[in-house]
């Protein structure tokens, strides 16, 4: 029997998301979520995608070790436990790979040590990723464990895009540069956009707009990222649900000197109390649109600021690429908010960018074009699939 299944794990600080995929045909066999780990009200929701059956349980789950054991139990109930000979690998989402990891990597002690060394660059994410890896290793020490890094796709950026204009010695000493994030999504969507156009990724230049609560843009030339909006951390770039995006660095000094705010205070402000929620008190685009329709001025201004930043990045990345074949919208907002898509490209007809109102208004699950027939630049909605991308990369590395 050929082992063709990959279990994808995304371990957060208090949660574990997972999917089991069969890479023989790319099908999903199971999916689930363990949340509120470490609390009395821990919850596990598991869905067998073959039968459609869903099971839920609410009970204390002490730590990630207990969480993954619970996941293994649920999979075993479906006859697909971690001891299955059909399981080829476990693929782990790891947020930060620094400059070290430029591709998916089979995990050994040296890889674990390097991921741990990179914790200061992603203090909220890499520790949880490490916990998930170590727990999975303990459960199946004989099985290949593969790390797929959010930053890896962006390591092809030239130094002119990756370097900040600060003292080189200081930057190098503290690993300060632009790394970018959402890399698995940008990789998947840029390739899927080329497929939608019936062309090879190496023949296509794409601007990818990953618009969720976190949001990022990328310029992809011939399948390789040449620029992206997030930087050292996920704070840089577009206006997001709770993050400010681009900001004059002197604002931080001003808040410290004049506002008496500590480093932690400013961190909380810019990452959790800014963006859409800071502008109008909501970070759900559906609610913001409802408020706009009701005549809410604060919601309307927040929307305009959000779209203005988005349009600036589209124009900037058009200039970076020189020639653009497609703009692809993805993630929760990008896939579902027709008003955002239309507003982001409004007035850019001279650049060959336009949205067909009728096509844009149609809701659908698959990749689709929303630009008028014959447009110089295609505009697409491409649902992202980070789990499938992680599974593909892991299986390509270790599959039989």
Image (spheres, rainbow, N blue to C red):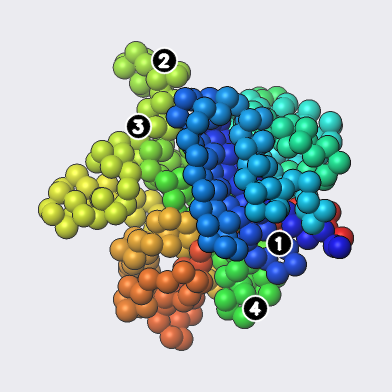
Marks 1/3: CA–CA distance: 40 Å
Q: Position of residue 268 (x, y in %)?
A: 41, 26
Relative image position of residue 237 (x, y in whole percent): 47, 45
* Sequence-first disc among 4 and 3: 4
- The residue where tag 1 is placed is 22
Rounded to the nearest angstrom, the CA distance separating label 4 from label 2 is 51 Å
Question: What separation in Å lies between label 4 and label 1 (alpha carbons)?
Answer: 26 Å
How busy is the neighbourhood of tag 2: few (under 14 within 10 Å), some, or many (20 plus)?
A: few
Q: Provide the residue designation for mark 4.
A: 199
Residue located beneath label 2 in the image: 262
Say which element carries label 2.
Answer: loop
Secondary element under disc 4, as helix, strand or loop, is: loop
Looking at the picture, tell me which residue is in the foreground, 177 or 2: 2
Q: Secondary structure at mark 3?
A: loop
Which residue is pictured at 32% across the width and 79% down the height?
A: 358
Left or right: residue 358 compared with residue 206: left
* 15 relative to 346, above or below: above
Residue 305 lies left or right of residue 183; in this view the side is: left
Task: Left or right? Give the position of 297 relative to 128.
Answer: left
Name the residue located 24 percent from the left edge and 41 percent from the top edge. Answer: 280
244 sits left or right of 229 in the view: left
For discs 2 and 1, the disc positioned in front in the rendered view: 1
Q: Residue drawn 78% across and 60% down?
A: 4
Residue 273 numbered mark, or none = 3
Disc 2 versus disc 1: distance between alpha carbons? 49 Å
Mark 3 vs mark 2: in front? 3
């Amino acid at each position: 029997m050929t082992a063709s299944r990959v279990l994808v794990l995304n371990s957060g600080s208090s949660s574990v998301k997972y999917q089991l995929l069969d890479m023989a045909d790319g099908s999903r066999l199971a999916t689930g979520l363990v949340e509120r780990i470490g609390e009395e009200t821990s919850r596990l929701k598991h869905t067998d995608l073959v039968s459609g059956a869903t099971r839920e349980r609410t009970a204390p789950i002490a730590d990630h070790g207990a969480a993954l054991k619970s996941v293994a139990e649920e999979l075993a109930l479906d006859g697909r436990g971690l001891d299955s000979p059909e399981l080829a690998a476990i693929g782990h989402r790891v947020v930060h790979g620094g400059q070290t990891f430029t591709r998916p990597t089979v995990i050994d002690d040296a890889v674990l040590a390097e991921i741990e060394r990179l914790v200061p660059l992603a203090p909220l994410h890499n520790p949880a990723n490490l916990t998930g890896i170590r727990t999975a290793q303990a459960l199946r020490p004989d099985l290949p464990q593969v790390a797929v890094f959010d930053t890896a796709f962006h390591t092809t950026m030239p130094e002119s895009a990756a370097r900040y204009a600060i003292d080189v010695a200081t930057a190098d000493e503290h690993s300060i540069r632009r790394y970018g994030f959402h890399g698995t999504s940008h990789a998947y969507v840029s390739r899927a956009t080329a497929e939608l156009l019936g062309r090879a990724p190496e023949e296509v230049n794409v601007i990818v707009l990953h618009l969720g609560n976190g949001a990022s843009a990328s310029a992809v030339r011939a399948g390789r990222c040449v620029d992206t909006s997030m930087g050292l951390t996920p704070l840089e770039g577009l206006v997001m649900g709770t993050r400010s995006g681009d900001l004059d660095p002197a604002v931080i000094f001003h808040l410290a000197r004049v506002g008496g705010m500590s480093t932690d205070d400013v961190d909380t402000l810019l990452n959790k109390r800014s963006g859409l929620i800071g502008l109008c008190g909501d970070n759900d685009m559906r609610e913001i649109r409802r408020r706009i329709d009701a005549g809410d001025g604060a919601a309307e201004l927040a929307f305009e600021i959000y779209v203005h930043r988005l349009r600036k990045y589209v124009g900037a990345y058009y200039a970076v690429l020189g020639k653009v074949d497609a703009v692809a919208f993805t993630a929760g907002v990008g896939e579902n908010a027709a008003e955002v898509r239309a507003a982001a490209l409004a007035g850019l007809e001279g650049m060959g960018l336009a949205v067909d109102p009728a096509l844009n208004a149609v809701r659908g699950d698959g990749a689709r074009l929303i630009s008028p027939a014959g447009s110089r630049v295609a505009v697409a909605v491409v649902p992202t699939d980070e789990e499938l991308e992680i599974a593909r990369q892991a299986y390509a590395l270790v599959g039989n």
